[in-house]
Amino acid sequence: HVPTATQRPEGRPPVPTTHMASGLSMRPTLWAVLLVFVCASGVPVEDDDERGRLSAYSELMERCKEIREGRADTCDYIFTAPFAYFLDYVSKRVPDGQFSGSATAWKARCSSGILVKDPPVCWAAAYMLIPFPLTENKEEVECNALTSHSVDQLSREDLISRYKFKALTVETRNLEQQTCALLRTSCALGMDFEVLGQDWGKRKMTRAVKIRLVADALRRIPEAERSRTIVINVDSSDVFMQSDKESIMRNFLRQDSRILFSGEMDCFPFRYFPMSMTLGNNTMILYGPVEERYSKLHVCDRLYPKSKSSPVRWLNSGSWVGFADTALQAYESVRDVPRWFMDRWPGSDQGFFNTLYLSKRYGIKIDLCSEVFATFKTVEFNPEDEREYHGLWQLYAHGPLRHQFNLVYAEKANHTSPFKYLWKYKNTERIPAAMHFNGGSFNKMHDHVRFKSNHVSSEENQFLESCAPMRRIEVSMQMKDLPDNAKCLAVQHKCMEKLAVLRDEKKCGFDNQTMEKMSIKNLSGLAFFTEMSPVRYFTPLTFEEHKTFAAASHAAVSRVGVEAWLALVDGAHYIPGNHQTYMAHAYLEARRMYREGFWELVSMALIMIIITFSLKYLQKVWSSKGAGMVFQLSRMETGKVKV
């Protein structure tokens, strides 16, 4: 039994009682930590279930620590009493037929090494600390219904007088190099972020420290003001702002939430084992459209709300907005958890905040309709794509239709905005206040291009290095100069001078013709694909030829449909190029499968050797330019066959 919200103070996760379960032992230090939880929460001793959970958590933490310190292997301690208790605890709370609950199955799944993110014992400890219900969440959000008469009727003066506003970000590195996009766009909108961690020096910034810095900043807000102070917290280096604090506060208040997190279209980290807990009919991630990709994974598909008008569904921890008092309660709920565990919480800090959300504490909601936040992943070859591997024609046929190129389109801003263009979310017709380029897409074009294909000139390499997708999109907003009397961190750290160089020299922004296309909703995907897809770097096509080819393919697909178009060009199965391109593919696949250690080198070498020998065999008949591969098969019993 987990106590209900009415049985314990708001802001505390369900905490078990301090009694030993038979067959399990606890160390005094963890007893002390858990006694603090119990005393602080005031939760009564209820039943054996809670006592067992407490004991199992303590024992699992000790085993997890051994693994994290290298004294045991990742898949160890699955055949132990506390892990057996965890499996039984989960199996009792999940719908029938959705749990592969035997220790043998978990051991085999872990030993496979496929999409294994963390030690099962460590995830078991995290779940026993903050358990969450495993029954289906049937909530459906209608974006058009997100209105609040009481909020909409507030004048700007009333809103500002009723609520205080504070903006936070954490950054220990050089602000001029890392945070200028956030600082200059927020300054132009009349906001100035408080940057936490600038006095941290060269010490390593860990997740536990980041949580502590934010908690300390929230604690500095006078206690009497916390319940009416709205705080926004965003990542520092991959976010820029589009709306002022008034818009942020109104859109947050409309959602009837205490804390509102950014949403995204990737179920990270619960698509990985062991966070998926082998719940569902299939424990492997499926590749396909967003709405089908996680259909076999119980946690991803059944525990999160849906929206018919938006593909955004899962929580992204990079940005949130909420009331200071509730946010402080959430951050302080783990103040007594060992730092080593918080630094390596299973699934990263995103795993921690998703666990808090699923526990149904603190009034946390996800911004499914992108009222305040939008995540914008621009990497083409990643798990969010419809396919893991692509053909040239498939890329040109599907490319302009892919979701990562069709998230937003440009809209001309009104005269009061400091920008000429704003980016509007297609599905919901909202202009999100914060644009978040998650997944590493803010600082690089695409992994594939980094291998410097033979078709990439030195000038293009320099362009790709200096003009990341986020920078191109920000520069293309054509931000006006700040007022002469502006006093903010963007001025202090010379961020405007950096923008002026990029803008005036026309290095990174999209040209006027491209911006016109991006302003047309049904052509914006083609414009983004033309400018940002890496496909042309693996063909001999010039940029102008690439644009023409993309436009022609898009026109054909728009007329006859993707499948009919691909049927017309059937046989074109590979991107034309040379063996270095395929070596790059092989390296990426090896790196994806084996992230660490000796097996990465072995797998990379084997794949490269196989592909090299294959390509040598095909070299004489390989088409050096064009859309496909033509070769003559040897004579067979049925006669000569031409493909």
Image (cartoon, grey):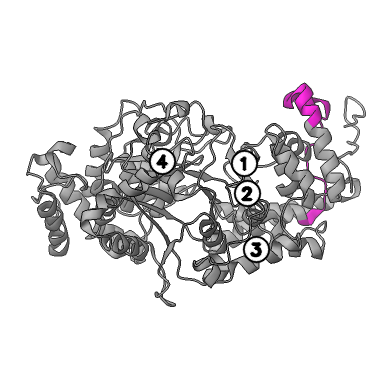
Q: CA distance from mark 4 to mark 1?
A: 28 Å
Residue 79 in sight from this viewpoint: no
User: Does residue 89 appear in this view?
Assistant: yes
Q: Residues within 10 Å of mark 3 (few under 14, many from 20)?
A: many
Label 3 close to label 4 by CB (< 8 Å): no
Left of 516 or right of it: where is 82?
Answer: left
Residues rendered magenta in the picture: 555-580
How far separated are the C-alphas under marks 3 and 4? Answer: 30 Å
Discs 4/2, front: 4
Split into 4 quadrants, where in the image is the C terminus?
top right
The answer for how far apart the CA atoms under marks 3 and 1 are is 25 Å
Between the C-alphas of marks 1 and 2, the distance is 8 Å
Which SS class for mark 3? helix
Q: Amino acid at mark 2?
A: Val
Quarter of the image for residue 73 reads bottom left
Which residue is identified by label 4?
250
Name the residue located 56 percent from the left edge and 64 percent from the top edge: 180
Which residue matches tag 1? 404
- Point out residue 333 in the picture as x, y percentages from the top left corner: 24, 53
- Whether label 1 touches label 2, CB < 8 Å: yes
**Which of the marked residues, 4 or 2, is nearer the chain's N terminus?**
4
Q: Which mark is residue 379?
A: 2
Nearer to us in this view, 164 or 284: 164
- The verdict on residue 562 being magenta is yes
Disc 3 marks which residue?
499
Task: Please give the name of the residue rendered at 18% of the width and 38% of the height, measured from the top-left corner.
Answer: 5
